[in-house]
Structure formats: structure tokens, C-alpha cells
Image (cartoon, rainbow, N blue to C red):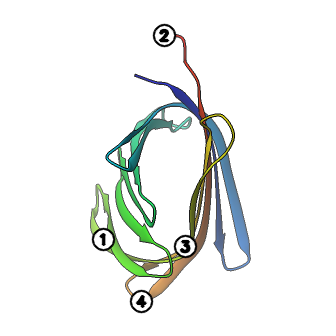
Amino acid sequence: MQNSKINLTLTITQGFEISKTSYEADASFFEKDGIFFLFFDEENYDDETITKCRFEISDDSLRMRRNGPIVVEQTHIKDQKTRGYIKTPFGHVGTELQTSGFSFTPQRSDNYCLDLGYDLYIGDEKTGNYSLEIIIKKEEIPS
């Protein structure tokens, strides 16, 4: 059941190039046993594919899974290096993530803000610096 809207902004810095993606989506957001769960679909407007996104958010970590044409699994813990992977039609690639910033803070009236900053490495090569902000607004969404 969808009960929220999210505003997502992702900024990727690769060398001197900066790209920014922003969108709004309907979402399901709830807490269970001290862990917050966020589910939403990300639509690729170029080919109309859907990527299902799942976030598990605790006080000190974020586990993110994106399941679509490309599958991404990442765990973020502030100031720590963690491992993840990217699975494409061409193969499976291990990744390392150096999380520099992580905060999940309540705003007013059941709204939350997730801020995440990290460097992504494939092999020994840094592929970019990522900054993700998600504003979660709890509300009833008409069916």
C-alpha cells in the first residue's frame, strides 16, 4: 500500500562532470522493529522499464537494493568502506563504497529526510562521488 510521496535528487560527480537527476514518486514507507522501510518504483522514461527500489534504514546504516534491468545492492555505514555489487546483462561486478555522509532525520508531521554521500569504486578505480537526498512525505495516495 502506497502511503507516501518521495522527492529524490541524485548528484553524480565524475571528474569535472556533474550530472543531476530529480524525480517524484509514490512510495510505501513504514517502520518495523526499529528499521524504516521505503519501497518505490523508478521509471526509465527512455525505454519505459521499471526498477523496483527497496531501502532499509536504521540509525547507522542504509541497505539499498535496486531490482530492474540492472540490479544494484549496496550497504552504507557512515565513515566505513563496504562492499556491494552491480549485476548487468553482461555480468556481475563487485563494488566498494566509501560512505562519507549518512543521516536520516525526522522532519515535521511524519516527514523524513535521507541524506547520503559516498564514493563508488569498481576494482581500484573510483567511478564517481554520489550525493543522494530523498524527502519522504507521508500521505494517503488515492488508489
The residue closer to the viewer here, 92 or 29, is: 29
- Distance from label 3 to label 4 (Cα)? 15 Å
21 vs 75: above or below: above
Answer few, some or many: residues within 10 Å of disc 4's Cα (few below 14, many 20 plus, some between 14 and 19): few
Say whether marks 4 and 2 touch (CB < 8 Å): no
Q: Residue at x 62, y 39 (%)?
A: 111
Nearest the eye: 24 or 68:
24
Q: Which residue sits furthest bottom?
A: 124
Query: Does residue 56 lie above or below 5 as drawn?
Result: below
State the mark number for residue 118: 3
Disc on res. 93: 1
Instruction: Kindly report the distance in space between the C-alpha atoms of the residues bearing marks 2 and 1.
Output: 39 Å
Q: Residues within 10 Å of mark 2 (few under 14, many from 20)?
A: few
Residue 113, given in percent of the width and then of the height, sits at 62, 50
Q: Amino acid at mark 2?
A: Ser
Of marks 1 and 4, which one's residue comes earlier in the chain? 1
> Dots 3 and 4: beta carbons under 8 Å?
no
Relative depth, front residue between 101 and 70:
101
Marks 2 and 3 close (CB-CB < 8 Å):
no
Three-letter code, disc 1: Val
Which sits earlier in the primary sequence, circle 4 or circle 2?
4
Q: Quadrant of residue 45?
A: top right
Marks 2/1 in contact by CB < 8 Å: the verdict is: no
